[in-house]
Amino acid sequence: MNEKLQGIIYIIIAILIIVIMLEVPWFYVYLIWIIAIGLIIAGVYLLIFKK
């Protein structure tokens, strides 16, 4: 993926996380779980499948 596109996606995700945290505090807990699981899956993918 293009680094600039990846940076833009990260910024958008960060802004969404902040907005959701301020508007819906209880959803934040679920969001953290979703992000953590996604990062674990991405890390395992990068370790195993990327050369």
Image (tube, rainbow, N blue to C red):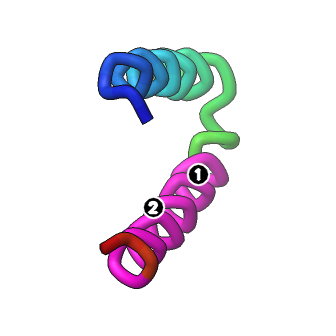
Location of the N terminus (image quadrant): top left
Residue at the spot x=52%, y=28% of the render? Answer: 17
Magenta span contains residue 47: yes
> Which structural element holds mark 1?
helix
Q: Is residue 29 above or below residue 43?
A: above
User: In 3D space, how far apart are the residues under numbered discs 2 and 1 (Cα atoms)?
Assistant: 16 Å
Nearer to the camera, 49 or 37? 49
**Does residue 48 appear left or right of residue 27 in this picture?**
left
13, above or below 50, in the image: above
Q: Which residues are magenta?
A: 30-48
What's the mark number on residue 39? 2
| Main secondary-structure element of the magenta-colored stretch | helix
Percent across and percent down for residue 32 are 52, 52
**Which numbered disc, 2 or 1, marks the residue that appears first in the sequence?**
1
Is 12 or 44 nearer to us in this picture? 44
Which kind of residue does numbered mark 2 sit on?
A: Leu
**Residue 27 left/right relative to 12:** right
Where is residue 36 drawn, in percent x and y?
Answer: 48, 62
Judged by depth in the image, the label closer to the viewer, 2 or 1, is 2
Residue 51 place in picture, x, y as percent: 31, 74
Badge 1: how crowded within 10 Å, few (<14), some, or many (20+)? few
Point out the residue furthest to the front here. 51
Magenta run includes residue 45: yes
Position of residue 48 in the picture relative to residue 31 (left or right): left
Residue that badge 1 annotates: 29
**Residue shown at 55%/60% (left/top)?**
38
- Amino acid type for the residue under numbered disc 1: Val
* Residue 24: image location, x then y, percent: 68, 27
